[in-house]
Image (cartoon, rainbow, N blue to C red):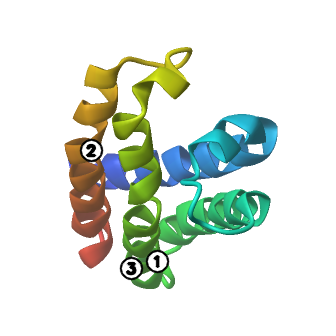
Amino acid sequence: MTPKSVALFLLGVFFIAAGTNHFVHPGFYLRIVPGYLPDHALLVALSGVCECLGGIGVLIPRTRRLAGIGLIALLIAVFPANVQMAQHPELYADVGSALAFYIRLPLQLAVIAWVWWVTRTRP
């Protein structure tokens, strides 16, 4: 196994687990959807399904590249939820600190880079 194949497998598992968590603990995700967005429950469910499908898709060579593009688009789309947490840390004190929420913002770029790296070519 190469480092890239391990990173690819971990990415797939990460997104499948994260997507599944949207259905196991929807309350958390409902709380972080910015108020200006409509139908929070639908957005949480859609993002959960997309994370699961993206995680599965990156594990299948034939769909890997498209799944990577989709996951990057999803990570960009959910970025406002991370900004919401950083701007209003008092609403999420039970899950982290203001510092943690601000650190999470650039980490989103690292996850995007991870997706890009492992889905551009076959490991």
- Look at the image and tell me whether residue 28 can be seen: yes
The answer to whether residue 85 is left or right of residue 7 is right
The answer to whether residue 123 is left or right of residue 81 is left
Percent position (x, y) of residue 48?
67, 57
The answer to whether residue 102 is left or right of residue 94 is left
Q: CA distance from mark 3 to mark 1?
A: 4 Å
Q: Earlier in the sequence, mark 3 or mark 2?
A: 3
Percent position (x, y) of residue 35?
59, 55
Tell me the kind of residue under disc 1. Gly
> Which residue matches tag 2?
105
Q: Quadrant of residue 39?
A: bottom right
Q: Residue at x 35, y 46 (%)?
A: 6
86 lies above or below 96? below
> Which residue matches tag 3?
69
Q: Nearer the viewer, residue 56 or 17?
A: 17
97 lies above or below 30? above
- Figure disc tally: 3
Q: Nearer the viewer, residue 119 or 89?
A: 89
Q: Secondary structure at mark 1?
A: helix
Q: CA distance from mark 3 to mark 2?
A: 20 Å
Q: Residue at x 22, y 64 (%)?
A: 117
* Label number found at residue 4: none
Circles 3, 2 touching at the beta carbon (< 8 Å)? no
- Look at the image and tell me whether residue 121 can be seen: no
Tell me the kind of residue under disc 2. Leu
Q: CA distance from mark 2 to mark 1?
A: 19 Å
> Which residue matches tag 1?
70
Q: Earlier in the sequence, mark 2 or mark 1?
A: 1
Percent position (x, y) of residue 21?
69, 41
Q: Secondary structure at mark 2?
A: helix
Tell me the kind of residue under disc 3. Ile
